[in-house]
């Protein structure tokens, strides 16, 4: 039975090590305690002595490769002893003792690291699942014919993985303070552990939103600029036309105006209707405006009004009615939530004055609309003699925020765009 | 029975002129189709030239609109007599959208006209005969008063399909008239190589139903014989085989060259017995037609043909997506 | 509920449809006074008369051809071909005429027709009383091809076929006529839709597609291998054209492995179509090769018992095929 050479755990806080140099080749004889391999960790460089007499039967880790403590690095045995098949390795228990503070959820489980060509036939579904889950198939033991990794093997492997492994204590930064007053320590130590709270399982929508938002933040250089707009003329127009729209079966919401104003501005500042690519900034020919719809505690969804620049206010309003209704009743078709080139999110409907929305990738900007609020504003006017006279007025105002991707748009362009939106709204006729 | 040669003319002048009109219209359309083919403007045409008298005479013995026709590809004159318009024929010839037989899915002259109870037929010959018997069975089961006329060339009566169809109709006394347009040629194969009997009608006796041979160049004779067969069928007395001897004055189709299998003198001799010209002379002699009326008929026919061609040439082809349906009844698009 | 045989299910279907609609009639050899050589139409001649249960001449071509004509006139004929082995003379009428009528007339003419024929071997029928013919017809757009395996489906599918406005080739597994019994509801209209497959046994490890008698053997095999820890999902296809692709694909997406069983000879058999569908649309879900278990590529089922047994797939062979695929 061959003897395993394990990556040692060289300190309480050491979790992994790097093989820097093999001192013995495969098929070379080695004596117990003879140096076998040089390894490097955060804290130390050291040699690993051989645990037995014999011949190197196999080496599993390349020079320069970093593996977790407990990983099998090599096998030592009698010359001619059959080498283990990649398939019949299976999971082996860790040699290192886990420290008491280590949470139970993360067992040390070294797996024989196989070379790619040892994996055997990879069936289409296994390949697909590996890609989907970002699996290193060499970590998955195979129980199929000739040690093939079967779909069941992949499923079993996925189930055995901790899904959201909590970090080990040393992976979270400490306070960095030495010698705190003893009273604090004592007081801290005697506090009872916080009662555990409730866990809400993550559904697909939640995961998807989380994923998208975080990735967006990592992708774009988010900058937000703010302007305000006086909606008097919009309100007047809406009041005048609401009834006739209603007769056409269309509810004329403010959103239709925001979309129309955004479209006007998008046509004039095409850089805001664009996407980043390594080949260059892609200026989209179509103006497809997404309107974020809240689904309450089920998250949010962004149906897209295609070619919004071709639509009249009535058509926009109708489209918004339809998409929002079907968004809430889950009747949107996949193509209706794709292909957007710009997004509007109306956080004002939930009372927010002002917010800094996250860009809907791969777009270059997102327009946030705040709550409609009557505010006191200064109105500039002219006196009878032509002199400038300021007065106070009460106006229905909203804050408009534009979050832009600074890779594509500089502040000035963003402000130009936002200014055009404001202008369109304030001069509505 | 046998060969009928006696004749009773009991048709009105109006009817005689109507018959003549359809024969002329058929001939003029037919001739134009040949011209269009030789000009490279249509891909395929199969002709009724020489068959017009038999076809029109037979059709006029039916209650048009009530009785059923299960035709074969040579029956242009019959279709016209049942209401197919020259434009509809030309649309079919050119494979244009809106042609009523098939929406341009079938080759030209593969007739179907539901509004006139004309059933769609295919290219494998004689399959239509069984359909005619089946329709006859349906009529009998429903107790309706209609009869079924089905046509075929003499060559196709060699098919098992024909025998089985006639046998069925005879066994069950179905209201079907099996008309055979015997022009002596199945493409290039003469009837002597096609059957051992002298006349197709002679096969009927072997199947237990009456068979009559009549001169297909005389529309009134055909009309008389067909009327008797129709009356028999409508009275519930069963089917009849009516064989009309005609001339195929053209090659089998636009793709055929008949010089390799029949001498020119034979074709020339047929011209001397042209049934359309023959009927014209007959009507002139009977006083049912005068030269002025004849000129008007010819002029009207030419005008209708010209108009049909002009409109059909302008008409659009069907969109390619039309090829995809209707495979099943569920796919039928209405309107 | 009544416990009846498969052939009784067919008989009941025809009885009910003739009762319900006077346009429906039956035509075929020996269907009248004899009640059919398998007694599929027993009692119907006495009940509906010679006008509606017609003993035809010995001529399959015209059984179907005349049926087509009647259908064109608005009747709903059920044409019986005595054995599927004798359907070939009618092939011209079925394929050139019935299948193409609707398409070639742009929908002006339709053929609401059922062509019924007993098919399949294992009954000592030799080469000309045992054939499977479904592959020929499943290839023809414009036709529907249906094969029931249970009394419930025999009755429900035949009733639906009679009401379908298209020509339906309805093939009946004759070995199962009296061998297969099952429950059928009484006193209610039983209609099983065409174009839908049925999952007769759920499983996670392997999808097993079958129809006709093979479906029963498939279930037996599935029970056997379940004892060995292999969970097979068995699907009765029921309609071969149009086939229920959705159910087929959903099953293989779940299991990753597919085995198709039919008694028809292997090459060009219907299983090849299912295999092609899976290869094209479920490629990235496959965890093993798509396998077929079928009759051997000899011209037809031989007569003598040992030869017949050599030909016919059975539960044991299906079990072996399952084990082999499951182990891949």
Image (cartoon, helix red, strand yellow):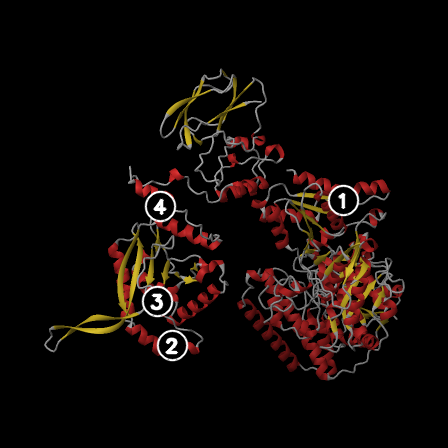
- Element class at badge 4: loop
Q: Depth-wise, is mark 2 or mark 3 nearer the camera?
A: 2
**Mark 1 — residue?**
C315
Mark 1 touching mark 3, by CB under 8 A? no
Disc 1 packing (10 Å; few <14; some 14–19; many ≥20): some
Closer to the chain start, of discs 4 and 3, is: 3
Q: Depth-wise, is mark 1 or mark 3 nearer the camera?
A: 1
Residue A278, disc:
4
Residue A188: x %, y % from top left: 35, 44
Write the residue at 44% across / 31% down.
A67
- Would you place residue C57 above or below residue A133 in this image? below
Same chain check for tags 2 and 4: yes
**Mark 2 — residue?**
A242
**Mark 3 — residue?**
A260
Host chain of mark 3: A
Host chain of mark 4: A
Between C199 and C132, the one lying in front of the other is C199
Host chain of mark 1: C
Mark 4 touching mark 3, by CB under 8 A? no
Write the residue at 87% across / 61% down.
C30
Same chain check for tags 2 and 1: no
Disc 4 packing (10 Å; few <14; some 14–19; many ≥20): few
Closer to the chain start, of discs 2 and 3, is: 2
Closer to the chain start, of discs 2 and 4, is: 2
- Element class at badge 2: helix
Write down the quadrant of residue C180 in the picture: bottom right
Write the residue at 83% across / 71% down.
B174
Asked whether residue B78 appears in the rendered view, the answer is yes
- Would you place residue A198 above or below residue B109 in this image? above
- Element class at badge 1: helix
Write the residue at 67% across / 77% down.
B21
């Amino acid at each position: 039975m061959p003897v395993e050479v394990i990556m040692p755990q060289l300190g309480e806080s050491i979790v992994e090590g790097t093989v820097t140099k093999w001192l013995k080749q495969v098929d070379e004889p080695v004596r117990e305690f003879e140096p076998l391999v040089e390894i490097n960790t955060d804290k130390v460089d050291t040699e690993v002595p051989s645990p037995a007499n014999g011949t190197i039967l196999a080496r599993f880790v390349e020079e320069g490769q970093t593996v977790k403590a407990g990983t099998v690095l090599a096998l030592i045995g009698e010359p001619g002893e059959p080498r283990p098949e990649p398939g019949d390795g299976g999971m082996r228990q860790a040699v290192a003792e886990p420290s008491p503070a280590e949470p139970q959820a993360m067992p040390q489980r070294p797996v024989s690291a196989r070379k790619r060509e040892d994996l055997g036939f990879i069936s289409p579904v296994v390949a697909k699942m590996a890609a989907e889950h970002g699996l290193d198939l060499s970590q998955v033991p195979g129980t199929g014919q000739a040690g093939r990794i079967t779909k069941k093997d992949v499923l079993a492997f996925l189930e055995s993985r901790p899904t959201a492994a909590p970090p080990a204590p040393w992976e979270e930064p400490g306070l960095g303070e030495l010698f705190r007053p003893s009273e604090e320590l004592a007081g801290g130590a005697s506090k009872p552990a916080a009662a555990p709270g409730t866990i809400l399982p993550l559904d697909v929508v939640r995961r998807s939103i989380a994923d998208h938002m975080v990735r967006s933040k990592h992708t774009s250089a988010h900058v937000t600029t703010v302007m305000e707009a006086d909606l008097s003329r919009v309100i007047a127009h809406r009041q005048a036309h609401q009834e006739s729209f209603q007769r056409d079966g269309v509810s004329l919401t403010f959103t239709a105006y925001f979309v129309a104003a955004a479209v006007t501005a998008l046509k004039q500042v095409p850089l805001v209707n664009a996407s980043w690519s390594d080949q260059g900034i892609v200026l989209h020919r179509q103006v497809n405006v997404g309107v974020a719809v809240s689904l309450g505690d089920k998250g949010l969804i962004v149906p897209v009004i295609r070619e919004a620049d071709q639509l009249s206010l009535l058509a926009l309003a109708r489209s918004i009615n339809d998409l929002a209704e079907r968004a809430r009743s889950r009747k949107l078709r996949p193509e209706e939530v794709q292909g957007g080139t710009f997004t509007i999110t109306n956080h004002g409907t939930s009372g927010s004055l002002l917010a800094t929305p996250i860009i809907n990738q791969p777009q270059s900007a997102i327009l946030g609309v705040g709550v409609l609020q009557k505010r006191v504003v200064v109105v500039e006017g002219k006196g009878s003699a032509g002199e400038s006279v300021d007065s106070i007025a009460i106006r229905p105002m909203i804050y408009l925020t534009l979050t832009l991707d600074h890779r594509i748009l500089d502040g000035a362009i963003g402000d130009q765009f936002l200014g055009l939106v404001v202008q369109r709204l304030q001069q509505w006729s | 029975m046998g060969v009928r040669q006696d004749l009773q003319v009991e048709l009105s002048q109006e009817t005689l002129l109507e018959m003549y009109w359809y024969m002329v219209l058929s001939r003029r359309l037919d001739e134009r189709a040949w011209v269009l083919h030789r000009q490279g403007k249509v891909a395929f045409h199969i002709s009724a030239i020489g068959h017009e008298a038999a076809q029109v005479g037979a059709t006029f013995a039916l209650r048009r609109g009530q009785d059923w026709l299960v035709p074969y590809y040579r029956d242009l004159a019959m279709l016209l007599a049942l209401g197919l318009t020259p434009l509809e024929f030309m649309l079919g010839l050119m494979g244009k959208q809106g042609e009523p037989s098939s929406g341009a899915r079938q080759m030209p002259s593969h007739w179907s006209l539901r509004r006139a109870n004309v059933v769609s037929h295919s290219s494998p010959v004689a399959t239509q005969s069984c359909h005619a018997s089946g329709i006859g069975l349906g009529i009998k089961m429903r107790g309706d008063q209609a009869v079924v006329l089905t046509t075929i060339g003499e060559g196709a009566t060699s098919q098992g399909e024909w025998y089985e169809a006639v046998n069925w109709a005879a066994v069950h006394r179905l209201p079907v008239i099996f008309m055979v347009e015997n022009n002596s040629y199945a493409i290039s194969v003469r009837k002597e190589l096609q059957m051992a009997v002298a006349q197709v009608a002679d096969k009927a006796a072997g199947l237990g139903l009456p068979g009559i041979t009549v001169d297909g160049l005389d529309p009134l004779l055909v009309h008389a014989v067909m009327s008797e067969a129709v009356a028999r069928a409508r009275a519930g007395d069963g089917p009849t085989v009516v064989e009309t001897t005609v001339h195929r004055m053209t090659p089998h189709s636009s793709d055929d060259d008949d010089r390799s299998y029949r001498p020119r003198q034979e074709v020339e001799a047929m011209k001397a017995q042209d049934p359309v010209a023959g009927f014209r002379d007959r009507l002139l002699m009977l006083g049912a037609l005068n030269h002025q009326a004849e000129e008007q008929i010819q002029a009207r026919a030419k005008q209708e043909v010209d108009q049909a061609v002009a409109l059909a040439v302008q008409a659009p082809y069907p969109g390619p997506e039309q090829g995809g349906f209707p495979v099943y009844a569920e796919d039928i698009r209405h309107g | 509920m009544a416990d009846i045989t498969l052939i009784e299910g067919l008989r009941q279907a025809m009885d009910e449809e003739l009762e319900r609609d006077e346009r429906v009639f039956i035509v075929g050899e020996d269907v009248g006074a004899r009640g059919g050589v398998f007694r599929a139409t027993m009692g119907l001649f006495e009940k509906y008369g010679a006008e509606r249960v017609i003993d035809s001449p010995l001529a399959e071509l015209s059984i179907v051809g005349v049926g087509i004509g009647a259908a064109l006139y608005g009747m709903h004929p059920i044409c019986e071909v005595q054995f599927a082995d004798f359907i070939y003379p009618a092939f011209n009428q079925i394929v050139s005429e019935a299948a193409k009528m609707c398409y070639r007339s742009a929908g002006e003419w339709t053929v609401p027709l059922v062509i019924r024929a007993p098919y399949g071997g294992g009954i000592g029928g030799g080469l000309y009383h045992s054939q499977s013919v479904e592959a020929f017809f499943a290839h023809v757009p414009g036709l529907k091809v249906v094969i029931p395996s249970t009394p419930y489906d025999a009755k429900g599918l035949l009733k639906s076929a009679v009401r379908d406005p298209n020509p339906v080739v309805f093939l009946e597994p004759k070995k199962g006529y009296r061998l297969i019994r099952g429950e059928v509801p009484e006193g209610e209209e039983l209609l099983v839709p065409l174009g839908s497959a049925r999952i007769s046994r759920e499983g996670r490890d392997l999808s097993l597609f079958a129809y006709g008698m093979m479906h029963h053997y498939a279930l037996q095999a599935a029970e056997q291998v379940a004892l060995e820890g292999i969970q097979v999902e068995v699907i009765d296809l029921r309609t071969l054209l149009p086939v229920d692709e959705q159910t087929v694909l959903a099953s293989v997406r779940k299991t990753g492995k597919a085995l198709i069983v039919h008694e028809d000879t292997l090459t060009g058999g219907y299983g090849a179509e299912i295999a092609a569908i899976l290869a094209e649309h479920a490629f990235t879900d496959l965890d093993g090769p798509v396998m077929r278990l079928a009759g051997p590529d000899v011209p037809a089922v031989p007569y003598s018992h040992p030869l017949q047994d050599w030909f016919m797939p059975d539960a044991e062979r299906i079990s072996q095929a399952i084990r082999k695929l499951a182990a891949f």
